[in-house]
Amino acid sequence: MIYADNAATTRLSDQAFERMLPFLREWYGNASSLHSLGTKSRRAVEQARGEVARVIGAEVSEIVFTSGGSEANSWLLRSMAAAFRNEPMHIITTSIEHHSVLNACRACERDGAEVTYLPVDEAGRVLPKDVEAAIRPDTKLATIMLANNEIGTIQPVAEIGRLLRDRGILFHTDAVQAAGRIPVDVRGLCVDFLTASAHKFNGAKGTGFLFKRSGLSLGLSPLIFGGKQEMGLRGGTENVAGIVAAGCAITESAAILGETAERLGAMADATIRGILTGVPGTRALGDIGNRLPGLVNLVFKGVSGESLMHLLDIKGICVSTSSACASGEVSHVLLALGLTEDEAKSSIRISYGRYNSMEDADTVVSAVCDACKKIRGSR
């Protein structure tokens, strides 16, 4: 099987697996217990917190572990709504955010907040000048993803962060697709909050983290009431094995970031060239010159994306038609780019990862070209 759906999830790295395994079978103590097994688990959690902090340029005290990116995004948005519930609150976001952000923003609207959903250009870029124009006296927060999960476009988050910082507006970026794939530096990005999920960078499912910049006068409301875990913000027994794997995986990804990005970028370029040549009436989406390495989204004229995905699956190739979190829906991201519903339904996303090779890309190109001919020939 060729797995080319790494934007949905990634294979757990061998190193992360080896690091987490003892905490499932031998060192299984509760990290809040005071005996030796508990102390060993607590040290492992704090070591992982330090590993995450080092990779993204944060302080250890600024990292809170969660169950994943969606939880972290929802927690942040709802926490901000609660913090400003007694005063006018305006939020700025974009039309192509992940559903965990968009649905949380809609929940905030039901609670009385006002939200501006900024458009993007044909490459999926939000323009800093549009962010600036949307700012109002009651703007309390902006949330703009670092890189899009469907088309891979990387946003000018650092530039946006600087203009928001100058105006005293809190800024969050969803870095679920970016962390472990491109350099992420919370200071350079000028963000107050950043969220990520370990299973996107070869960690284990069920673990993510939220960065909250120190020095903010505004605190987060507890997500889960209970004990003092995660600085009293998220009660409950920690997922020690998952947290250990997250720290290991993000450190491992950072160490090979440049080499991996170059290799995956070459694979994506070869895939785009091969398919555009072999399948007339096809076009690539997103900002081709400024995208996540290894992610390709293509629209095929006269070809159902779902049919194409299933034909590839029969051949042992895993791709997707949209975000895994929106399976079966017409992509709101592609509609925001100006595509019609029919065009949006004729797209597939190919996302290579650490364990793919150029040979995989060649096989994908050949299989896509053959499948498209079969689909078109049956009409």
Image (spheres, grey):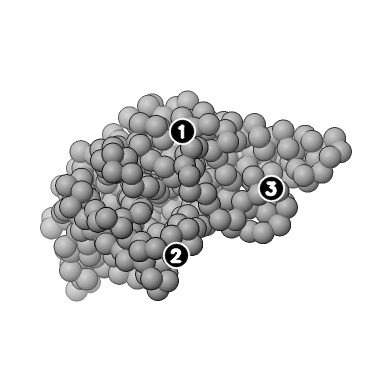
Q: Which SS class for mark 3?
A: helix
Q: Where does the image place residue 234, in percent across and percent down from the top left?
A: 63, 53
Disc number for residue 198 = none
Q: Is residue 371 visible?
A: no
Residue 362 shown left or right of residue 9 in the figure = left
Residue 36 shown left or right of residue 229 in the figure = right
Residue 155 shown left or right of residue 233 in the figure = left
CA neighbours of label 3 inside 10 A, class few (<14), some (14 to 19), many (20+): some
Q: Nearer the viewer, residue 202 or 173?
A: 173
Q: Quadrant of the C terminus?
A: bottom left
Kindly check if marks 1 and 3 are in contact, taking CB atoms under 8 A apart as contact. no
Query: Mark 3 or mark 2, which is nearer the start of the sequence?
Result: 2
Query: Mark 3 or mark 1, which is nearer the start of the sequence?
Result: 1
Residue 70 to residue 343: above or below:
above
Kindly check if marks 2 and 1 are in contact, taking CB atoms under 8 A apart as contact. no
* Alpha carbon distance from label 2 to label 3: 26 Å
Q: Nearer the viewer, residue 95 or 332?
A: 95
Nearest-to-viewer mark from 2 and 1:
2
Per the image, the residue denoted by label 3 is 229
The residue depicted at 36 percent of the width and 53 percent of the height is 141
Per the image, the residue denoted by label 2 is 85
CA neighbours of label 2 inside 10 A, class few (<14), some (14 to 19), many (20+): some
Residue 128 to residue 265: above or below:
below
Kindly check if marks 2 and 3 are in contact, taking CB atoms under 8 A apart as contact. no
The three-letter amino acid code for the residue at tag 2 is: Arg
Residue at the left extreme, as displayed: 281
Per the image, the residue denoted by label 1 is 56
Q: In which quadrant of the rendered view does residue 15 lie? A: top right
* Alpha carbon distance from label 1 to label 3: 22 Å
